[in-house]
Every structure is written in structure tokens, then in C-alpha cells.
Image (spheres, rainbow, N blue to C red):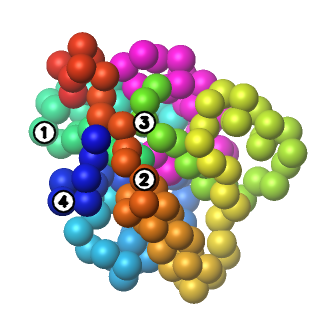
Amino acid sequence: MTTRREAITVLFAEDDPDDRMLVEEAFVEIDSSYDLRFVDDGEELMDYLRHEGRYEDEAPAPKPSLILLDLNMPKKDGREAASEIKSDPALRHIPIVVLTTSTSEEDVMETYGAGVNSFVSKPATFDGMLALARELSNFWIETIDLPPAPPDEEEAY
């Protein structure tokens, strides 16, 4: 299991540069030891997770301990990416927190149905994002033990 002493990689799939900056600044303020990584869309997320395309070399793409996932992205949206991740035996153990502006009940139901672990509305202000980053960190990083990759699938990472 991931412990607090290990490096924690948080992967955020988000196409909006302002939202990326807001999240990055909030995570830096709460604890700069997180390895926060970004991808622009669902296709890039899947390339990252499967070490394909520009992520073929494993070194620039460490296994994430947690995925933050926007729903509305180009190429492959977060709904499709969540379903793909949770249906892949090599990836399904990675917790996914949907972080989106959507408040649609349909989106909530669809993403939980796909197997995501949490659905959170994006705050519009830095103070709101800072509070959310602290809550995410307290729960997903400090409180619970994150699962390791399944032993027979460690080679994928």
C-alpha cells in the first residue's frame, strides 16, 4: 500500500489551463512534496496510464496514486476515460475523483456507475480550491491506504 513516506503522484486530466494552474497552486501551498502531473484530455490520460505515445518511456509517467478527472474534455471526455480505466484490470485499482463544474445528476450517476470513487464540484475561487486540496489530501493521501498495483500487473508500471 502507498504510505505517507512514498512519493505520491496525483494525475489530473484537465484541458482548462486556468483550472490546472488553480489546482497546481493549491497543491503547492498545502504540500509541495506531491508529484502533481497533468494531461490535457482523456486520450492523453489513457496514453499516460498505458505508457503509449509520448509516454512510452516509463520514466516520465510514474504510476499515479490518485487520478483527478474533469468530465468535459476534448478528444475523449472524462466519462469515457473513467469507464475505460475501471474496465481495465491493470488500471482499475487507481482511485478516481471526478473534479468538474458539472452538477448534473446524470453525470453523477453515470460516473459512479462507471466505478469512480468520488464526485466533487470544482470550486471557482483559489480559497475554495485550497480548501478542497486540503480535504483531498487529508482523505486520499493522509487517511486511507491507497492500493498498490496488483502483483501480477506490476510489470505494466
Q: Nearer the viewer, mark 3 or mark 1?
A: 3
Tally the numbered discs.
Answer: 4
* Residue range of the region highlighted in magenta in the rendering: 67-91
Q: Earlier in the sequence, mark 3 or mark 4?
A: 4
Q: Earlier in the sequence, mark 1 or mark 2?
A: 1
Q: Earlier in the sequence, mark 4 or mark 1?
A: 4
Is residue 47 visible in the rendered structure shown here? no
* Residue 34 as seen in the image, left or right of residue 120: left
* Residue 121 as seen in the image, left or right of residue 4: right
Mark 4–mark 2 Cα distance, whole angstroms, equals 13 Å
Query: Is disc 3 in contact with disc 1, using a CB cutoff of under 8 Å?
Result: no
Look at the numbered disc 3 and give the secondary structure of its residue.
loop
Which quarter of the figure is the N terminus placed in?
top left
Q: Nearer the viewer, mark 4 or mark 1?
A: 4
Residue at the (37%, 48%) spot, across then down: 145
Task: Please give the label number shown on residue 7.
Answer: none
Q: Nearer the viewer, residue 142 or 79?
A: 142
Q: Inspect the magenta stretch and tell me whether residue 77 lies in it.
A: yes
